[in-house]
Amino acid sequence: MQEALKSMGYYTSPRGGAPSPHPLEQGRLLFELITAGGVYAPDSDRLCRPGWVFVHCPGENTVWRAEPEGHYECLTASFDLAHITRPESWPRMFQWQDADAAVTFAHEMLHAFHHTAVDREILGDLVWSRLRFQLDHFKRQQSRRDIPPRVSAVMAYIDKHFSEAPSIDVLADHVGLSASHLHARFQNFVEMTPHQYVIRRRMQSARHRLATTMDPIKSIASDIGYANTESFCRAFKQHFKTTAADYRKTYMIYR
């Protein structure tokens, strides 16, 4: 993005919120990241506290209503749409899950914009990319929330015990369902079987270990639940279309 970030500021509302909403001008995209207090979402009675991000397109109104005795504070970042080479599809609002991290980020960006000589293009890329990253995380969390509680509980159990290769009977007993019922519901909502989910979690763990440690492949295989190295290596190559050793060579810079 070439000089897409046009302005960055900080707003503290009076009690009850801003006097009125502000319609966004043409050619701009505005983000408001709530850092303190609470503000009502546009056209809604949902009170949003620190960590919520509002995205305003041209012609849309900014947030403005707070509780009668309350207020809100927010970071504002305005982008010039003409200089955004890859416009994204942004929702009206989304939540930065770690509110403390969101507040820290807001103040760091404000300081960089107003008190340092950091390149505005670099700063704009950083703000844009970080918000996109948090939006992606929010979407993934939302999709998991749509999963029924007992299926979600099985996923959480597998996340913790994938090295033990829990059987479908153990998983079903954990949530009080029959094995066949759990298998069907899990595949319907997660789009894979419990066994496939176990393998995916094992492969995720193996990939991280290969890229970040020099632990022997034999140890990694054993730690994630494989009886022998050969079985692990076959599974890894089937999953990633490369060998564990080659994966490590590709992603570990310092060996």
Image: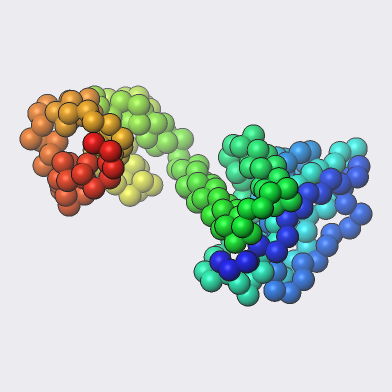
Residue under the image location 54 percent in, 55 percent down: 129
Q: Is residue 65 left or right of residue 247?
A: right
Q: Is residue 207 left or right of residue 62?
A: left
Q: Position of residue 165 (x, y in %)?
A: 22, 28
Q: Residue at x 46, y 43 (%)?
A: 144
Image quarter (top left, top right, bottom left or bottom right) of the C terminus: top left
Q: Position of residue 221 (x, y in %)?
A: 17, 30
The reply to whether residue 158 is in sight is yes
Task: In the displayed orientation, state which residue is furthest to the left.
Answer: 230
Task: Report the label total.
Answer: 0
List x then y, in percent, for residue 181. Answer: 31, 38
State left or right for residue 105 relative to residue 236. Answer: right
Residue sitting nearer the eye, 81 or 143: 81
Residue occupying image coordinates x 51% and y 50%: 133
What residue is drawn where x is 73% and y is 74%? 26
Q: Is residue 124 visible?
A: no
The quarter holding residue 207 reads: top left
Q: Position of residue 187 (x, y in %)?
A: 31, 46
Q: Is residue 171 above or below residue 87?
A: above
In front of the other: 146 or 101: 101
Relative horizontal placement of residue 225, taking residue 227 as reference (left or right): right
Viewer-side residue, 115 vs 213? 115
Q: How is the model colour-coded?
A: rainbow
Quadrant of the frame with the N terminus: bottom right
* 7 w.r.t. 230: above or below: below
